[in-house]
C-alpha cells in the first residue's frame, strides 16, 4: 500500500515531489508512448500503460487513479463533489440551465454542495466504498473560478480523509493564478480541457470568456484562453504536477486541429491526452445541440486517437462522468449519496479497513496482470495483420462477469498479435428490462458495437444470440467469470488458427454509433 | 437604476456574487441570487461594465430594473 503511505503524510509527499521534479519530467518527456505502429510488441500503452511501461515515480502516482490509469479503472473508484458552480468561460457544448438525475455527462449535477457538505459526503462514500481512492472537483463550472470553495473543500478532506488523492479539472483560464496553491494542497493531478491552440478555431467553440473583470468575445477571447491554458500547463510541469489534457472532438471544427493540440500539450509535459466525443443531442439545449453540430462516430474517434498515440499517452476509458459522479467509472452510484441520505448515514471512517480492502484489490489486480502475461506467451512469434474489435460485458474487476441483458455499456478491446488492447467503451440502454428482451433496445446495442467481431458476456439468451449472429457479431459466453484480456487473447488465437486453416474468412467490420448521454440505468 | 436578476434564468451558479464591487448580490433561500437595489451602483466608477452582466453565463439574466433611477457617482 505504497500510495496510501505516500499520501498520509502530505508534507513528505510534497517534499518528494519537489526533489524529483526534474527527474520525473525528464522521464515523462522520454516516455514517448509505444503506439500501435512501432512494432515494439507491447500489448498496450497510453492509458493502458502498466507498471513496466512507466517510470516508477509516475506509476506510483497514477496506479490507483481510475481516470489516469486504464488498468486502475477496473478496480478503483472516484467521486466528484459539486462545490464549484460558477464558470468564467462559456462553451458551445455546455448548457448551464440543464440538470437531470438520469443524465450522465460533464456539467450535470443533481445538487450543489457547500465545502462542509462535500467533506461529509466524501467520508460517507469512502466508508461505504473502500476502493474509493480519488476525489475530484470538476464543476459544474470551473473549480478555479470558485477558488475559495474548491480549496476549502480540499482543506477539510485532507484533514478528515488523508489517504484520498485530490484532483481538479479546469478550463485553465484561471490556472496560472492558482498553481502555487494547488501545489501547496498536494494536488498531484490536474486535468485541463484544451480544445484548440488556434484562436480562430477557439472562436467557434467559445462565445466568451470573463477575464480580469471584463468579458471578451471571439478570437480575442480564444487567444487569451489558449495563452493562459498553455502557461498553466507549463507551470504545472515545472512543479512536477501530472497533467491530463481533455479535448472535445467536434467534427468539422477542431477534429483535424486536435493533432496540433496534441503536439503542443505533449511538448509542454502533459502526461495523458483524453480526446472525447462531442455530446450534442438537441434535447440538451447546448449551442452545438441546437445548431445540429454532430458528434464523431466510433471509427472517427478511434482514428484520431490512434493518430495521436505515437505522440503521447492516449486515454480511452473516459466515461464523461457527471460532475457529482460516485463509484467506479461507468457505474454511477451518486443517487445513493444525496445530501438527505448522507445526513442520515452513520459514518465510520476506518482507515485500516480501507487499507485492508485495497490490499485485497491489489492482489486481484496482480492476478489479472499475471493471467494476461501468461496468455500473451501463447501468441509469441505469431504474425498476422488481422486486427479485430470485441465488446465485453463486465461489472469490473477485469472480468467477463456481466449478463448481456444487464450491460449498460460494453468495453471495447482491439485484438492483434501484440495482444488485447483496451480502446474504449460504448454506452447502451439496458437491453433486458425485467427479463424481457426488447427489439428496439437490441437494435441500439448492435449499432453501438457494430464494429466488433464478437461480444463477450457472462450469459446471454437465445433470441439476442441469434440476432447478434445475424448482425455478424459472435456472442461468446464460454469465458464467463474469467479475466477479460486473458480470454480475449485465447479467443484471438483460436480465431487466427481457424483463419489459417481456412475454416473462416476474416471480414472487416463497419462503423459504430456513439450513444450520446445515454441513461445511467439503475 | 439598479440591476436585477431574472429568477427564471438564474441557475444559482454564484459567479456574480464575488464579482460585485458593492456586495449587493446575495444568495436567496431558494439557492438563486438576488441584487439589493439599494446597494447596486451599476458598477459606475468601478468597472467599464456591470460585473454581474459581464460574468453571468446566461443571457438576459442580469438586467436593468427600470423602477429605480439611474445611479450617479458621487
Image (cartoon, coloured by chain):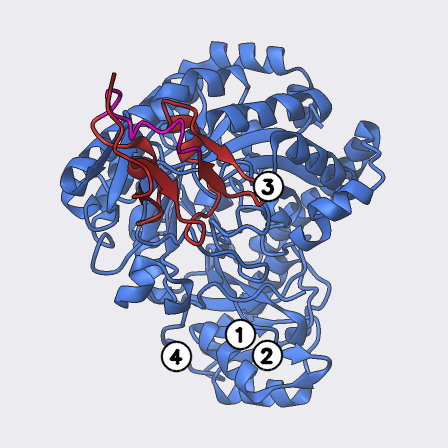
Chain colours: A blue, B red
Q: How far from the left and from the top, in percent, is residue A459? A: 70, 75
| Alpha carbon distance from label 1 to label 3 | 54 Å
Bounds of the magenta span? Answer: B36-47
Q: Is residue A57 left or right of residue A269?
A: right
Q: Nearer the viewer, residue A88 or A234?
A: A88
Q: Which residue is mark 4?
A: A507
Q: Which residue is mark 1?
A: A454
Dot 2 falls on a residue whose secondary structure is strand
Do marks 1 and 4 both belong to one polypeptide chain? yes
Q: Quick one: label 3, few (<14), some, or many (20+) residues within 10 Å?
A: few
Dot 4 falls on a residue whose secondary structure is loop
| C-beta proximity under 8 Å, tags 1 and 2 | yes
- Residue B31, by quadrant, is top right
| Alpha carbon distance from label 1 to label 4 | 12 Å
Comparing labels 1 and 3, the label whose residue is closer to the camera: 3
Chain of the residue under the numbered disc 3 shown in the image: B
User: Magenta span has B40?
Assistant: yes
Q: Which residue is mark 3?
A: B29
Our reading of the magenta stretch's main secondary structure is loop
| Alpha carbon distance from label 1 to label 2 | 6 Å
Examine the rendering and report whether any part of residue A51 can be seen: no
The residue under the point 67% across, 15% down is A9
Query: Any mark on residue A111, and which?
Result: none
| Alpha carbon distance from label 2 to label 3 | 55 Å
Q: Which residue is mark 2?
A: A475
Q: How far from the left and from the top, in percent, is residue A471? A: 48, 86
Mark sitting earlier along the chain (1/4): 1
Amino acid at each position: 500500500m505504497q500510495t496510501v503511505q505516500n499520501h498520509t503524510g502530505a508534507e513528505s509527499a510534497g517534499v518528494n515531489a519537489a526533489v524529483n521534479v526534474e527527474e520525473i519530467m525528464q522521464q515523462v518527456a522520454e516516455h514517448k508512448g509505444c503506439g500501435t505502429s512501432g512494432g515494439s510488441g507491447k500489448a498496450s500503452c497510453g492509458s493502458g500503460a502498466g507498471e513496466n511501461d512507466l517510470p516508477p515515480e509516475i506509476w506510483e502516482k497514477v496506479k490507483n487513479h481510475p481516470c489516469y490509469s486504464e488498468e486502475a479503472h477496473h478496480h478503483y473508484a472516484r467521486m466528484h463533489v459539486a462545490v464549484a458552480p460558477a464558470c468564467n468561460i462559456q462553451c458551445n457544448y455546455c448548457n448551464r440551465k440543464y440538470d437531470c438525475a438520469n443524465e450522465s455527462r460533464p456539467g450535470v449535477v443533481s445538487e450543489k454542495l457547500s465545502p462542509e457538505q462535500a467533506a461529509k459526503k466524501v467520508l460517507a462514500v469512502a466508508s461505504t466504498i473502500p476502493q474509493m481512492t480519488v476525489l475530484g472537483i470538476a464543476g459544474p463550472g470551473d473549480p478555479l473560478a470558485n477558488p475559495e470553495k474548491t480549496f476549502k473543500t480540499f482543506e477539510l478532506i485532507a484533514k478528515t480523509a488523508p489517504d484520498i488523492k485530490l484532483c481538479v479539472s479546469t478550463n485553465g483560464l484561471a490556472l496560472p493564478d492558482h498553481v502555487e496553491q494547488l501545489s501547496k494542497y498536494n494536488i498531484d493531478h490536474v486535468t485541463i480541457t484544451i480544445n484548440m491552440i488556434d484562436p480562430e478555431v477557439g472562436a467557434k467553440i467559445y462565445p466568451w470568456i470573463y477575464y480580469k473583470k471584463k468579458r471578451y468575445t471571439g478570437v480575442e477571447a480564444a487567444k487569451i484562453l489558449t495563452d493562459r491554458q498553455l502557461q498553466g500547463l507549463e507551470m504545472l510541469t515545472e512543479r512536477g504536477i501530472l497533467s491530463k489534457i481533455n479535448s472535445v472532438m467536434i467534427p468539422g471544427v477542431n477534429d483535424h486541429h486536435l493533432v496540433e493540440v496534441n503536439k503542443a500539450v505533449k511538448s509542454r509535459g502533459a502526461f495523458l491526452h483524453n480526446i472525447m466525443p462531442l455530446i450534442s443531442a438537441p434535447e440538451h439545449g447546448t449551442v452545438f445541440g441546437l445548431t445540429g453540430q454532430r458528434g464523431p462516430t466510433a471509427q472517427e474517434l478511434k482514428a484520431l486517437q490512434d493518430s495521436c498515440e505515437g505522440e503521447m499517452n492516449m486515454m480511452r476509458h473516459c466515461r464523461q462522468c457527471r460532475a457529482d459522479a460516485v463509484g467506479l467509472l461507468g457505474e454511477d452510484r451518486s443517487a445513493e449519496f444525496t445530501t438527505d441520505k448522507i445526513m442520515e448515514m452513520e459514518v465510520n471512517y476506518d482507515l485500516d479497513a480501507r487499507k485492508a480492502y485495497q490490499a485485497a484489490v491489489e492482489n486481484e489486480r496482480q492476478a489479472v496482470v499475471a493471467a494476461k502475461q501468461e496468455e500473451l506467451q501463447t501468441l509469441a512469434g505469431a504474425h498476422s495483420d488481422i486486427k479485430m474489435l470485441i465488446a465485453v460485458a463486465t461489472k469490473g474487476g477485469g472480468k467477463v462477469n456481466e449478463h448481456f441483458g444487464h450491460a449498460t455499456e460494453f468495453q471495447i478491446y482491439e485484438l492483434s498479435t501484440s495482444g488485447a488492447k483496451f480502446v474504449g467503451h460504448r454506452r447502451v440502454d439496458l437491453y433486458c428490462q425485467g427479463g424481457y428482451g426488447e427489439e428496439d433496445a437490441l437494435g441500439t446495442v448492435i449499432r453501438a458495437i457494430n464494429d466488433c467481431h464478437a461480444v463477450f458476456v457472462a450469459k446471454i439468451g437465445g433470441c439476442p444470440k441469434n440476432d447478434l449472429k445475424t448482425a455478424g457479431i459472435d456472442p461468446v459466453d464460454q469465458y464467463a467469470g474469467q479475466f477479460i484480456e486473458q480470454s480475449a487473447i485465447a479467443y484471438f488465437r483460436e480465431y487466427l488458427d481457424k483463419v489459417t486453416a481456412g475454416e473462416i474468412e476474416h471480414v472487416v467490420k463497419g462503423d459504430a454509433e456513439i450513444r450520446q448521454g445515454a441513461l445511467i440505468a439503475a | 437604476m439598479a440591476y436585477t436578476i431574472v429568477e427564471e434564468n438564474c441557475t444559482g451558479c454564484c459567479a456574480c456574487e464575488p464579482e460585485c464591487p458593492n456586495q449587493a448580490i446575495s444568495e436567496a433561500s431558494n439557492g438563486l441570487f438576488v441584487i439589493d437595489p439599494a446597494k447596486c451602483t451599476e458598477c459606475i466608477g468601478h468597472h467599464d461594465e456591470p460585473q454581474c452582466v459581464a460574468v453571468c453565463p446566461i443571457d438576459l439574466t442580469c438586467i436593468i430594473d427600470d423602477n429605480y433611477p439611474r445611479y450617479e457617482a458621487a
